[in-house]
Amino acid sequence: MERYVKAVEKHRDLILKAQNDIWANPETGYREVKTSRYLEEAFEKLGYSLQRAGNIPGFVTVLDTGREGPEVLVLGELDSLLCPDHPDADPETGAVHCCGHSAQCAALLGIAAALKEPGILDDLCGRIRLCAVPAEELIEIEYRSELIRQGVIHFMGGKSEFLYRGLFDGVDLAFMVHTTSGKNFDVSRGAVGCIAKRIEYQGVSAHAGGSPWMGCNALYAATAGLGAVNSIRETFAERDLIRVHPIITHGGKAVNAIPDSVVLESYVRGSSFEAIRSANRKVNRALCGGALSLGANVAIRDISGYAPLKNDNGMIELAKDAAMAALGEELEINERIGTGSTDMGDLSCLMPVIHPHAPGAVGKSHGSDYFVKDPERACVSSAKWQLGMLVLLLKNGAERARKIKADYVPRFESKEAYFDYVRSMNCDGNRIEYDADGMAHVRL
């Protein structure tokens, strides 16, 4: 393992420069033009031939050992978050890498550089697919919904979109390492999935002071709906790890006019598809109740978000062995299911994956105090660890990769079957129909 570790160390300056450059130029999902171009140029300078995503940012490239074997996908995420209060936020957009994706990209570039070192592939077989993927953070639902309406994208998350476009065809196993503010290299058993929601309460505008009784206050309807959602939280079983956390993105146009349109965004997260569907129905019922209480209407767009993530047991053991071999460190294995969501969950429905964490950040994830304080750990050590996982998977005739693949039981028989299922979760339109006699018919 020593020569693989040294191959990464040789490119330490390249890795750290990439972390600094990408951190300084944050872009949110499906807007990562500068970030993608930066990595494209760096990869091409290393001698890689790229397959670009096309009309969205991101790319893949395949390195073939020339010996038959499985194909392993290694990913780095391009996008940032929105946190305008962060000291390093872009002053125009509010974007900032307060989830550490800049470190992921830097580590991915380090892996790419190390794999080009002479003789580095000699003991390996199969293929390695490296991917710079957009849009992991499930934000700006309005913007992404419009991209879907225009036919630019088909799915909210970049990994699902790449899967749909065939950029992962032929892949047998996948992994990526996320940056964390924890102290150790760690992994959990998985994470919850989610449905994304856009909710618009529709009322009637009127003069707020002179004749408010002539209007129908969409903001009050939304407030009633949010109150109803809060009132049903104790009906969610603890085992299902349901999380619902709406925000108001538009609350009215003028203080002296009754709001006729109020827009919210939310997720419904859960540990299984079944739990998500059940909780989402309850949430929709509560949201409709708020509209009914004022005689308003509510349009709810439910959009398949991310599948629950299941980290494969064989891949967890692999990551543990690689951490010791490449870094001399123990991997901390948490038996819990994380309550954040990631589109790595979508890939875990079709192939064995792992989504562990590398330390090096400080502060609250997604918060204004989040920084990559120790890029050596977050980027360089992460690259060593990931290269170690590749080596353990693909050496000795790729016996370990073959066994992990053979032991894996997919949740769906094909990507087409998966897409059919998640599309069945989509639903859009007004949820209440009022009769002339005042009767209301509700569609959840």
Image (cartoon, helix red, strand yellow):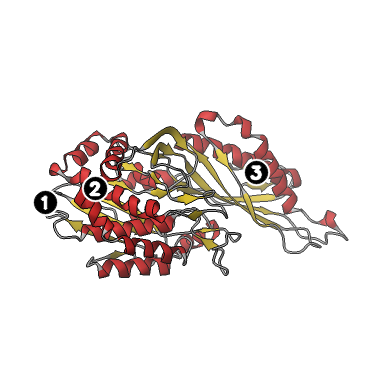
Kindly tell me whether residue 327 is visible in this rendering.
yes
Q: Residue 247: image x %, image y %?
A: 63, 51
* Left or right of 383 in this view: 239: right
Q: As shown in the figure, which amino acid type bears the numbered disc 2?
A: Leu
Q: Nearer the viewer, mark 1 or mark 3?
A: 1
Residue at label 3? 287
Q: Callout 1: few (<14), some (14-19), or many (20+) C-alpha neighbours within 10 Å?
A: some
Residue drawn at 28 percent across, 57 percent down:
9
Residue at label 2? 390
Kindly tell me whether residue 166 is visible in this rendering.
no
Residue at label 1? 67
- Vertical relation: 168 (above or below) 320: below
- Vertical relation: 287 (above or below) 18: above
Label 1 and label 3: CA atoms lie apart by 57 Å
Tag 3's secondary structure? helix
Residue drawn at 68 percent across, 44 percent down:
225
Residue drawn at 84 percent across, 56 percent down:
212
Tag 2's secondary structure? helix
Q: Callout 3: few (<14), some (14-19), or many (20+) C-alpha neighbours within 10 Å?
A: many
Depth check, front residue: 46 or 428: 46
Q: Nearer the viewer, mark 2 or mark 3?
A: 2
* Left or right of 433 in this view: 272: left
Label 2 and label 3: CA atoms lie apart by 47 Å
Q: Callout 2: few (<14), some (14-19), or many (20+) C-alpha neighbours within 10 Å?
A: many
Residue drawn at 46 percent across, 51 percent down:
361
Cβ atoms at labels 2 and 3 below 8 Å apart: no
Q: As shown in the figure, which amino acid type bears the numbered disc 3?
A: Leu
Q: Quadrant of residue 120?
A: bottom left
